Amino acid sequence: MEFGFIEVLKLIGALGFFIYGMKIMSEGIQKAAGSSMRRILSTMTKNRYLGVLTGFIVTCLVQSSSASTVMAVSFVNAGLLSLVESAGIMLGANIGTTITGWLVAVLGFKVKIAAMALPLLAIGVPMLFMRKNKVKHIGQFIVGFAILFWGLSELKHAVPDVKHNPEVLNFLGAYADSGFFSNLFFILVGTILTIVVQSSSASMALTQTLCFSGVIPFEVAAAMILGENIGTTITAELASLPANVHAKRSARIHSMFNIVGVSWAVLLISFTPALDGVRGVAMNWFGSADPMTAEGAPMGLAIFHTAFNFVNVLIMIWFVPLLVKLAIKSVKSKGDVDEEYSLDYINSGMMATPEMSLMEAQKEVSKFGEVVKRMNAMVKSLVAENLENKEVSKVLARVKKYEDITDNIEKDVADYLTKVSQNEMTESSSLKVRGMLSIVGDLERIGDIYYQMSKGIERKIEGKVYFTPEQRKNILDMFDLVEANLTTMCQNLSGSYSDVTMLKAQEQETTLNKYRKTLRKEHYASVEKGDYNFQSAAVYSDLFNSLEKVGDHTINVTEGITGEH
């Protein structure tokens, strides 16, 4: 049989089948473990050792070290993680990604799992049509599991048959016997393979299959696996390209971990009997066939991959502070804009799971709340006495700039949430998305109100219209009440949404409404008596009515958090 164009397509199709199964399985388990995922992620920020555990568990759940490292990069970009904390996650992800190799070695070659694929689909597919979300998600996991190993079975059939294609071995023979330089060549092959496939798990499965089929010897496959560890860092580097300097440094740390690890490992397998040690472990501890034979190779590669990553983590975890320093030196900041924490690049669609995406969105919405809170202090300063014209112009310009910022944040966050909602998600996540969309609308409206208030005050100053001391005191007191409302709102936005209650916000809203009612009553009485001129009265009533509207929107935000909107 000639290995021509159609056979290449079959090989690519089988690999695609495997990757698709991994994606379905990963999404199913993520949704089934939605709340657990949140709890795991909340442990991230403790220290680098917990970070390793977090990275390991999340990678086992999502079955992709690329997803975990992109998540870590995006969290650093958002200001949710420090560089040291993200380093721990990436180390853990490197161990977590070895799980797929074990699944493939234990089930893919030793058990005829492809024969089980149809019975598994018979169980999983009906579960997809159940009403309970949990059952649906477990069904999705089972279907993904079946497709994954069906794809692996097809992969075994799609790789070249060495008996009928001896030229494949002749080609590799020219490269496979030159020791250190041969290993460097196959490290490059493994790196390119992972960059092309964009999944180290899939390239690992392909390497195991090639070895099992006799296309490549065990030594070559071991070097390719080292290359796959470098190839997987490219995904994080790509994710960091449009991000801020902190995210770029986080991706650089991941690259340095793996490049340093591969450097010592290639010397070890080239100049010491390290692979003989792997043979001993496979045959004596796991009762496997000799990894140097086709039958025992997949298990030997799984052991080698795990041992390499585990030892690399044990070594590199002590050098995290040094790597952070090197990353800071090698990735220079381009100034204040580059230092700003931002989530804008996530609009490119690079997000690991809906759960993680919502954590990022919540951080952005929390920042939005702080922005409108600052506008309260700005507009309040315009009401205070003795501001010079130059200072007034500066404050008015700042209010206008902030109003533009609120418009942009609302658009960006709404676009991002719309993208997130296009993925399948749990009912609680779906409610959270709706709540956040309502919240950003209210926050943007608060920005508009403050801008309109600043324009009213500007006209008052230009028209040389003055408040009485009593009017000024009343308005400043109302600004203070609104400040309290905004503080509570920001606390609610930054905390866990499930812990928020309406009680404090409602009490503050009642106090603000009562005060506005009192001011309005006194205001109408003063106008009737002719205590102050019409222009002053109009600006005064506009201000206290506008502040009361801000209060309405702050209570709406808390309703959006609690799901009562």
Image (cartoon, rainbow, N blue to C red):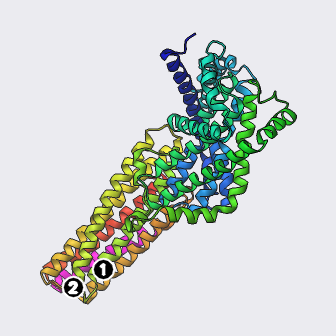
34 on left or right of 541? right
Q: Residue at x 20, y 71 (%)?
A: 455
Q: Are marks 2 and 1 in contact (CB under 8 Å)?
A: yes
**Is residue 157 on the magenta stretch?**
no
> Of 201 and 371, which appears nearest the observer?
201
Across and down, in percent, residue 314 comes to 73, 55
> Of 224 and 136, which appears nearest the observer?
224
Q: Earlier in the sequence, mark 2 or mark 1?
A: 2
Give the secondary structure at mark 2: loop
404 on left or right of 297? left
212 on left or right of 20? right
Residue type, numbered disc 1: Ile
Q: Residue at x 31, y 71 (%)?
A: 547
Q: Which mark is residue 475?
A: 1
Compute the Cα span from label 2 to label 1.
10 Å
* Residue interval drawn in magenta: 506-531
Q: Which residue is mark 2?
A: 467
Secondary structure mostly seen in magenta is: helix
Across and down, in percent, residue 393 comes to 21, 78
